[in-house]
Image: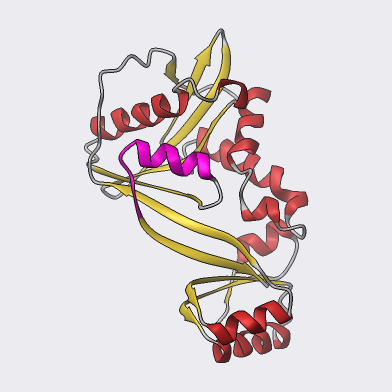
Amino acid sequence: MIKYLEWDSHFFKKKIGSCKVSILTEATLIDLFHEKTNKNYDLIYLFTQETDKKAKKTLEERYIKIIDKKVTYITHHISTSNQPTDFIIHYNGIISEELLQLTYLSGHESRFKKDPILNEKFEALYQQWIEKSLRGQMADSVFVASIDNHIRGFVTVKKNSNMGQIGLIAVDPSYHGQGIGGALIKAAHKWYAKNGITQASVVTQLDNTGACKLYTKSGYNVAHTQLIYHI
């Protein structure tokens, strides 16, 4: 039932596994608790589409709450508006402090930040993410919003088969409401079109209302939502 996660276990210095079920029942949950104990796991990421009433009660009795509502957005229409986005440029430089702080900001609703057991490694995790993105390992391209020679926003994009994918995206809070988020999405869409990509996806947290509004406004629709527990 539990899949051992080697990378996570090594990075967080804990024995970590994951379990995915469509519907979480009380019986499945009890089996999961037993396996976790017998195999000495420190942490289990539990992914499910739905939790039944008995399972919810069991989780409540153990003070286990949903740590994340992971929502996947998809668009089948890559809009390449001619709206000026001259301040959005391709970035292939080194990690600056501005870019690093924006990277941390992109994960402000992340379960890795919310979980007190993992929080101490949150910044190191996201720093690795942007480093690997700039090296072309976790992203194919990085775009930044350069305003007055400062980075005020950024987005990472990747081609996954015939699907475009946004990895990280954030805008300096002082510049919210100025259309920078939309401009970054448009830059991503232009890159998709240039690379023959006709559909795209992005994953965020349902609690990240700002991101959800941005994607909806940019023509994305909810494909599915997943509940995540950390046990």
Spot occupied by residue 163 in the image (x, y as percentages of width and height): 30, 47
In the rendered view, would you say 32 is above or below 10? below
Q: Is residue 96 visible?
A: no
Spot occupied by residue 108 in the image (x, y as percentages of width and height): 64, 43
Q: Can residue 230 be seen in this view?
A: yes
Specify the quadrant of the image occupied by residue 174. top right
In the rendered view, would you say 221 is above or below 190? below
Spot occupied by residue 35 in the image (x, y as percentages of width and height): 65, 87
Provide the residue span drawn in magenta.
209-222
Q: For the C terminus, which image quadrant? A: bottom right
- Residue located 74% across and 72% down the image: 42
- Residue located 65% across and 38% down the image: 104
Q: Count the numbered circles shown.
A: 0
Left or right, 178 with reference to 159: right
Left or right, 13 with reference to 154: right
Which SS type dominates the magenta stretch? helix
In the rendered view, would you say 141 is above or below 213? above
Q: For the N terminus, which image quadrant? A: bottom right
- Residue located 30% across and 40% down the image: 219
- Residue located 29% across and 50% down the image: 161
Q: Is residue 29 magenta?
A: no
